């Protein structure tokens, strides 16, 4: 049953739809990062400025390199060693081909490899996905599908149900840097 739901969610993403889904941290809103119209819908739903940029979930290190270029052995080690700790979103210099509707006003991109079965399967089925918390900017993050449907219901093309992970947004930090933009759980 879950594999059918993931396949359906992936098809909707590939067709330019916006979905809600569970991640290793919180419930998220997602879409195809290469579809400007879908990204604009996510930003509109969140009432979020495009200047801030968005996080992408990717399947693995190889998929991450599609957005960053080659990672060296030390960078790969840092990412892999953090995978057993707090869910971490990595801020890395973006390839020139990454659209500005993803990077915002930055020349970097924020990427995370999810440790959540549903989010990971969705990445395997759909490729990279926009991942932003399911809430209106500056409001609390939604923790259940009922609240999600109350806030965003008619504006979502699909809700991939399932429990979220930690309930706290991921840590966001520079890869190979000391800067932590947001502390995680």
Image: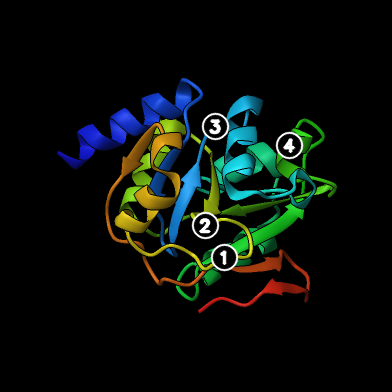
Dot 2 alpha-carbon crowd within 10 angstroms: few under 14, some 14 to 19, many 20 or more? many
Please say if 103 is above or below 125.
Answer: below
Residue count near mark 3 (Cα–Cα under 10 Å), binned few <14, some 14–19, many ≥20: many
84 up-or-down from 56: above or below: below
Q: Mark 2 sits on what residue?
A: 135
Q: Which residue position holds label 1? A: 139
Occupied quadrant, residue 167 = bottom left
The disc, 4 or 3, on the residue closer to the chain's N-terminal end is 3
Of helix, strand and loop, which one carries label 3?
A: loop
CA distance for labels 1 and 3 = 24 Å
What's the CA distance linking mark 2 and mark 4? Answer: 19 Å
Separation (CA) of disc 4 from disc 3: 12 Å
Q: Which quarter shows the N terminus?
A: top left
In the image, taking residue 114 as reference, residue 94 lies left or right, namely: right
- Do the CB atoms of the residues marked 1 and 2 lie less than 8 Å apart? yes
Callout 4: few (<14), some (14-19), or many (20+) C-alpha neighbours within 10 Å?
many
Q: Which residue is mark 3?
A: 32
Q: Secondary structure beneath disc 1?
A: loop
Secondary structure of the residue carrying tag 4 is helix
In this view, the residue farthest toward the top is: 15
Q: Is residue 169 above or below residue 131?
A: below
- Across and down, in percent, residue 137 comes to 62, 58
Can residue 148 be seen in this snapshot? yes
């Amino acid at each position: 049953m879950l594999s059918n739901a993931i396949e359906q969610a992936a098809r909707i993403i590939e067709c330019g739809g916006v979905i809600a889904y569970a991640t290793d941290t919180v419930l998220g809103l997602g879409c195809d990062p290469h579809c400007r119209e879908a990204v604009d819908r996510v930003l509109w739903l969140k009432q979020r400025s495009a200047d801030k940029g968005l996080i992408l979930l990717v399947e693995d290190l190889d998929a991450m390199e599609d957005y960053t270029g080659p990672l060296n052995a030390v960078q790969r080690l840092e990412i892999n060693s953090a995978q057993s700790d707090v869910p971490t979103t990595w801020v890395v210099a973006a390839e020139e081909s990454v659209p500005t509707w993803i990077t915002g006003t930055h020349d970097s991109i924020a990427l995370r490899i999810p440790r959540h079965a549903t989010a990971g399967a969705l990445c395997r089925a759909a490729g990279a996905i926009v991942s932003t918390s399911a809430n209106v900017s500056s409001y609390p993050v939604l923790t259940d599908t009922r609240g999600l449907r109350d806030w965003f219901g008619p504006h979502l093309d699909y809700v991939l149900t399932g429990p979220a992970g930690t309930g706290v947004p991921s840590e966001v930090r520079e890869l190979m840097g000391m800067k932590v933009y947001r502390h995680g759980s």
